[in-house]
Amino acid sequence: MSVFATLVEQLADLLRPLFGLSAAAAAIIAFTALVRLLVHPLSRAAARGQKARAALQPRIAELRRKHGKNPELQKAVLELHAEEKVSPLSGCLPSLLQLPAFFLLYHLFSSGTIGGEPNTLLTHQLLDAPLGGRWADALGDGGVFGGAGLVYLGLFAVVTVVAYVSYRLSRRMTEASAALAGTAGADPQVPGAAAMGGVMKVMPFMSFLTLVTVAVVPLAAALYVVTSTTWSVIERSVLYR
């Protein structure tokens, strides 16, 4: 983690002439963008996989009509996916690979010391809000409309807009997938279909959980979440158009 702290410090030093006291915050945003660029090829592959799975829905619906409740349906669907080289889990990889970076930032800005030395990163701020602080700290130091409170209000506003756009995008994708399948629900005979159907129903609303995350994690980690979520919405709107 000390190597990661050094990386953030050095990046902040490079950006200080442009961003002043908020250079570390800008460094975290730049770091997030770098992580998303590295993961982008997998996001493109996930988009291709999603489109391929959507294209298979009419054939899966035909298999449902052919096999009905027969256990052979599961085997037939698995064979179809294998034949078309479509993995139902490919869309999870981009999100999973970003988790280590988020947890590194979380621990880095939650620790008072690094390698036995005081954590100097905790002295950095975004305007009037310390990067190691949380919304509860901002409320206790100036209230909702104090300097730190206004920073969080700005973040909440950005997250709300991004979450709403993500919600609309997820709803469109879910409805398009259901239309291709010729059904509004998932067939429990298809492997993992029941669980996937449940996920697809709640997915449009999961974007709003980002508001809770931003409120409870250190501000540095919240910046990562806001930047990454915004990137995801823009990326999805381009890749899934």
Image (cartoon, helix red, strand yellow):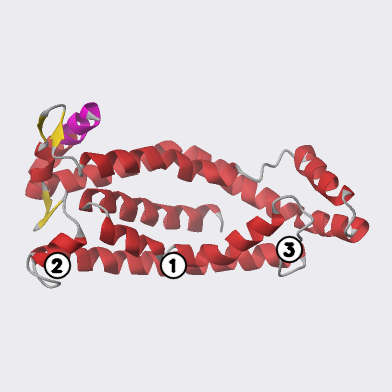
Pick whichever of labels 2 and 1 is earlier in the sequence.
2
To which residue does mark 1 refer?
Answer: 165
Check residue 139 in the rendering and tell me which mark sits there, or answer none. 2
Residue type at tag 1: Val
**In this picture, residue 96 sits left or right of residue 63:** left
Residue type at tag 2: Leu
Q: Which residues are drawn in magenta?
A: 2-10
Task: Give 36 or 212, whichever is nearer the viewer.
Answer: 212
Quadrant where the C terminus is found in the figure: bottom right
Quadrant where the N terminus is found in the figure: top left
User: Residue 120, image x and y in percent?
Assistant: 9, 37
Mark 2 to mark 3 CA distance (whole Å): 48 Å
Whether label 2 touches label 1, CB < 8 Å: no
SS at mark 1 in the image: helix
Pick whichever of labels 2 and 3 is earlier in the sequence.
2
Task: Give 137 or 220, whichever is nearer the viewer.
Answer: 137
To which residue does mark 3 refer?
Answer: 180
Is the residue marked by circle 3 packed among few (<14), some (14-19), or many (20+) residues within 10 Å?
some
Would you say the magenta stretch is mainly helix, strand or loop?
helix
